[in-house]
Amino acid sequence: MPVARIERILSGSVLAAAAKRADGRYTCHRFGSNIDPVRLSSLDEVADFLRANPKSSVRMNPSWTRISRNLYIDGVLLR
């Protein structure tokens, strides 16, 4: 089943959601790297990347922030 949403949730409130750049791709970062982004085309790829790379992050809106904790994939806590 395809991933429908990747969000940051705190105290039951959605604070941010994975967002595409202007080029239509999502931006992820490996732990410790802010200058070598990984560009992915679907939420499925983003979810796979986050699961395979502990402490990795994804850019989310609002404010285009890198989020690595309190991540939920389709409502299920990842970390």
Image: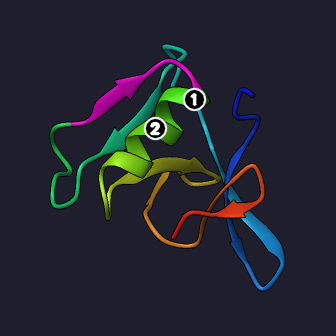
Q: Amino acid at mark 1?
A: Asp
Q: Residues within 10 Å of mark 2 (few under 14, many from 20)?
A: few
Span highlighted in magenta in the image: 37-42
Evaluate if marks 1 and 2 touch, with contact meaning CB atoms under 8 Å apart: yes
Q: Quadrant of the N terminus?
A: top right
Circle 2 is placed at which residue position? 48
Q: Amino acid at mark 2?
A: Asp
Which mark identifies residue 44? Answer: 1
Q: Residues within 10 Å of mark 1 (few under 14, many from 20)?
A: some
* Residue found 22% across the figure and 59% down from its top: 31
Residue furthest right as drawn: 12
- 15 and 47: which one is in front? 47
Q: Gap in Å between the C-alphas at discs 1 and 2?
A: 6 Å
Residue furthest front as drawn: 1
Q: Is residue 55 above or below residue 35?
A: below
Q: Quadrant of residue 27?
A: top left
Q: Residue 60 lies in magenta, yes or no?
A: no
